[in-house]
Image (tube, rainbow, N blue to C red):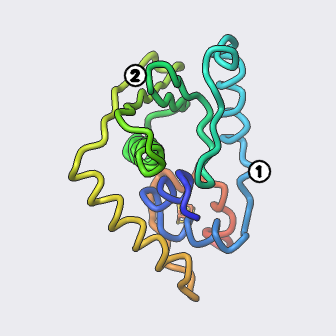
Amino acid sequence: MITGTHVSYYQVCKRKLWLFVNGIAMEHTSDLVYEGKLIHETSYPQRPERYEELEIDGCKIDFYDARNKIVHEIKKSDKMETAHEWQLKYYIYVLERNGIKGVTGILEYPVLRKTSCIELTDEDRLKIGEMEKEIQELIEAEGCPSGITDKICKNCSYYDFCYVGE
Ligand code: SF4
């Protein structure tokens, strides 16, 4: 089952996606994940009452406003904004696939006081279809894809794994 995390990692780095699906799980030790959790807890203390947490087709959506049909995705830094946007679009796509139409999204960076509205277009639907195929191929691939060399690597939980010996 492809989830929003797969889609996000696919956008960030194919190697990261491959390591993740092959059970090389270091994410739980990542400070960023911890900080992300903290943002959820401290920035929006009222949220759990107002919005639902939804699990659908393996995707865990933290803040769903069912009345207004809006998925809220909250992130700390906008450095990987494209990946965040696709993750959110994927949630909308999955809801649509399950018969919940007319959903939109709001991507929120409370620390930066920045929000963006996200909509799923026909072009996005086609792209997600292609992405799902490529993600499935990557999941089944035997070899670990090459990594990227980017400043985002420093904040990746696989940094030690990829840069060991350098
Ligand atoms: S450290 Fe860089 S190359 Fe390695 S998985 Fe993370 S993003 Fe990819």
Question: Label 2 sits on what residue type?
Answer: Thr
Instruction: Look at mark 1 in the image and give the residue it sits on.
Output: 28
Q: Which quadrant: the C terminus? A: bottom right
Picture coordinates of residue 142 (x, y %)?
58, 88
Front-most of residues 147 and 66: 66
Q: At numbered mark 1, what does the secondary structure look like: helix, strand or loop?
A: helix
When the figure is inspected, residue 47 is found, relative to residue 10, above or below; the finding is above
Picture coordinates of residue 17 (x, y %)?
55, 66
Q: At numbered mark 2, what does the secondary structure look like: helix, strand or loop?
A: strand
Residue sitting farthest toward the bottom = 142
Picture coordinates of residue 164 (x, y %)?
67, 71
Front-most of residues 71 and 85: 71
- Horizontal relation, residue 128 to residue 160: left or right: left
When the figure is inspected, residue 93 is found, relative to residue 71, above or below; the finding is below
Point 45% across, 56% down: residue: 12
The answer to which quarter of the image holds residue 107 is top left
The answer to which quarter of the image holds residue 34 is top right
Residue sitting farthest toward the top = 46
Point 39% across, 41% down: residue: 85
Point 45% across, 66% down: residue: 148
**Whole-Å distance between the Cαs marked 2 and 1?**
27 Å
Question: Label 1 sits on what residue type?
Answer: His
Precedes in sequence: disc 2 or disc 1: 1
When the figure is inspected, residue 60 is found, relative to residue 68, above or below; the finding is below
Instruction: Look at mark 2 in the image and give the residue it sits on.
Output: 115
When the figure is inspected, residue 76 is found, relative to residue 9, above or below; the finding is above
